[in-house]
Image (cartoon, rainbow, N blue to C red):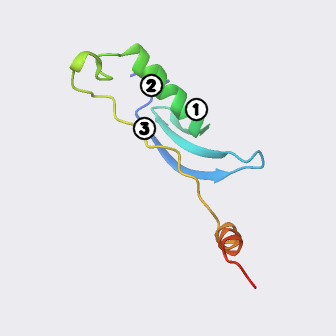
Amino acid sequence: MNAEEIREARVSYFEKRKDGKYYFTVRLARPVGDNSVYRTYQDFYDFHIKLMELFPEEAGEGGRERTIPYLPGQVVRYTQQHQTKNQKSKIKIK
């Protein structure tokens, strides 16, 4: 078994950082120990597109069964304050 081989990878946490982007903590399990890497949704999206380009049959081209799973769309989370602000702008006060 190669020491660099990744046995498992999973998203364990996400957070919004000062640059306004959400970062996902990806835990990597390796034979020599675990570590983490941090990736944005855009990183996952770019990787997904690259996989589909490199493996067109697995992406379902030519009427084949798709084995590369679909990537969920990016979800924008709104805070309670944002929702309240939007609701206030929709209410006309006389």
Query: Which disc number belongs to residue 76?
Result: none
Picture coordinates of residue 39, whole percent (x, y):
60, 37
Q: Is residue 61 visible?
A: yes
Mark 3 near mark 1, Cβ–Cβ under 8 Å? no
Q: Which badge, 3 or 1, comes first in the chain's sequence?
A: 1
Of circles 2 and 3, the one toward us is 3
The kind of residue on which mark 1 rests is Asp
Q: Residue 81 at x, y = what percent?
A: 70, 71
| Crowd class of label 3 (few under 14; some 14 to 19; many from 20; radius 10 Å) | few
Q: How many numbered marks appear?
A: 3
Instruction: Tell me if I can see residue 36 in this picture.
Output: no
Give yes or no for contact between labels 2 and 3 (Cβ–Cβ under 8 Å). Answer: no
Pointer 2 residue:
5
CA–CA distance in space, label 2 to label 3 = 24 Å
* Residue drawn 44% across the image and 25% down it: 5
- Quarter of the C terminus within the rendering: bottom right
Return the disc, 2 or 3, that comes first in the chain's sequence. 2
Which residue was labeled with disc 3? 71
Distance between the alpha carbons at the discs numbered 1 and 2? 21 Å
**Residue sitting farthest toward the front:** 94
Mark 3 lies on a secondary structure that is loop
Residue closest to the eye, 12 or 74: 74
Residue positioned 22% across, 20% down in the render:
63
Which numbered disc covers residue 43? 1
**Spatial separation of the CA atoms under disc 3 and disc 1:** 12 Å
**Residue 19 horizontal/vertical position (percent):** 77, 45
Asked if labels 2 and 1 touch by Cβ distance under 8 angstroms, the answer is no
The three-letter amino acid code for the residue at tag 2 is: Glu
Compared to residue 85, the image places residue 44 above or below, namely above
Q: Residue at x 58, y 53 (%)?
A: 76
Amino acid type of the residue tagged 3 in the rendering? Leu
- Horizontal arrangement in the rendering, residue 53 relative to residue 86 (left or right): left
